[in-house]
Image: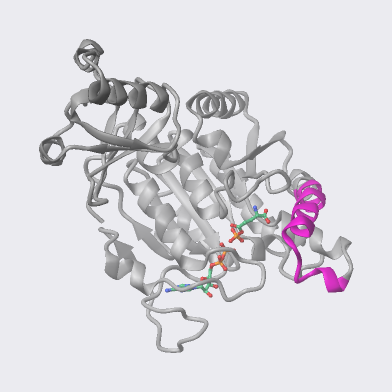
Amino acid sequence: MNISNSRRIVIKIGSALIAPDQDGCRARYLLTIAQFIVRCRSMGKEVVLVSSGSVAAGSHLFPEDAKNSSVVLKKAMAAAGQTEMMATWDRFFDFPSAQILLTHGDLRDLERYNSIRETIFTLLEHGILPIINENDAVTSDDLKVGDNDNLSAMVAAAADADVLLMCSDVDGLYNKNPNLHEDAMLIQQVSEISEDIYAMAGCATSTVGTGGMKTKIEAAEKATSHGISTYIVNGFKGRTFERLLLGENPGTVFLPYDEPMHAQQHWMTHTASEQGEIVVEHDYAEELKDHAEPLAASNISHVNGEFSVGDTVLVRTAKGERLAKATTNYSSCLLNFLAEQEETSDNGHLQQSIGPVISEQDIAILEKS
Ligand SMILES: Nc1ncnc2c1ncn2[C@@H]1O[C@H](COP(=O)(O)OP(=O)(O)O)[C@@H](O)[C@H]1O
Ligand SMILES: N[C@@H](CCC(=O)OP(=O)(O)O)C(=O)O
């Protein structure tokens, strides 16, 4: 899938394109990108924008010595910069745009995730451009995605997009950081995201970027496993967008999986985070390596952490091997109670009397890492 034959595109814009001088938003690069969005829409494609840059855009409103800033100041910069960024985007368009600010706390909760999907679909249906960013002003370590590359991949999956386009400050993925190595070579196509691909990725070298190439590869893995073709391209160059409209690849393309995951399995694997762990007996672990099997209470060795009915849990072996993520039908409290009864009283049959702790369709088997 390329831009010319795509139906729904998520475009992610890095901070350096929004605020290249780190003193507020600049139109220098955004104008070309906005024109690209207008062209895509006039070709009948639906576009969702994931825009970074609120911190970079807001930093000039704070004293110079605050720039190497504390987390609290960064949140304040994000809150102030977000309005400036939205106003800048809005100036370029003669159609309405809408702001959606998200945290990982929102995306990993299935009810809120579905509500986000509905909002995106309704906006698109009415010709409104959704502009999404992490809600940096309210996040904590526990709640945040932390970088907009991974956020854009989660959004692309939620929006049922067929292309994810990450616009950065380099031409694509190189075999090593091109800003540090003159002989670095551009990788034009990645058909499988292996450890070797991750090994090529370094950190961000700009003062405004977050995550560098590592988070872009993580994002590509999330998106391609959902069947979404993923591009990393240079947003500084106008030619990038002309080539994309011609159906060409001006940067690096990551090919989608031949057999993408089902939506719920994808959400569990790549978006939901585990609330606790269920450690399973050896025989069940062996079966799970082959195929998803309902988990009976008697297959459980013990549980770790606190979780409620409907939460996502990690299923692992006693040795720590990560086997699957799954939705649990019982709380940790009830499972601990049953285990206690099994050990201390004649009520061991209680374990047999309940239904599966995890149902077959609620298991997402994890690839071996
Ligand atoms: N193998 C690599 N190929 C390309 N860029 C790399 C690589 N390793 C590290 N980088 C760095 O990643 C940066 C892009 O990431 P980042 O600064 O987070 O951009 P953005 O703001 O677009 O998300 C590049 O400017 C470069 O310094
Ligand atoms: N949410 C942050 C952006 C975080 C981020 O991932 O930045 P970038 O690496 O420039 O895409 C902000 O708006 O400043």
Span colored in magenta: 64-85
Q: Is residue 348 left or right of residue 80?
A: left
Q: Is residue 293 left or right of residue 160?
A: left
Residue 238, how many percent across, how many down?
59, 64
Does residue 160 belong to the magenta stretch? no
Q: Is residue 312 above or below residue 205?
A: above
* Res. 31 image quadrant: bottom right
Residue 344, how many percent across, how many down?
26, 23
Residue 53, how many percent across, how many down?
69, 57
Which residue extends farthest top? 353
Residue at 51% from the left image edge and 44% from the top image edge? 10
- Specify how the rendered protein is coloured: one colour
Q: Nearer the viewer, residue 35 or 305?
A: 305
Q: Is residue 363 above or below residue 259?
A: above
Residue 325, how many percent across, how many down?
32, 37
Which SS type dominates the magenta stretch?
Answer: helix
Which residue extends farthest bottom? 182
* Res. 270 image quadrant: top left
Res. 106 in view: yes
Residue at 69% from the left image edge and 48% from the top image edge? 136
Residue at 35% from the left image edge and 67% from the top image edge? 198
Q: Nearer the viewer, residue 343 or 136?
A: 343
* Res. 281 image quadrant: top left
Q: Is residue 60 left or right of residue 110?
A: right
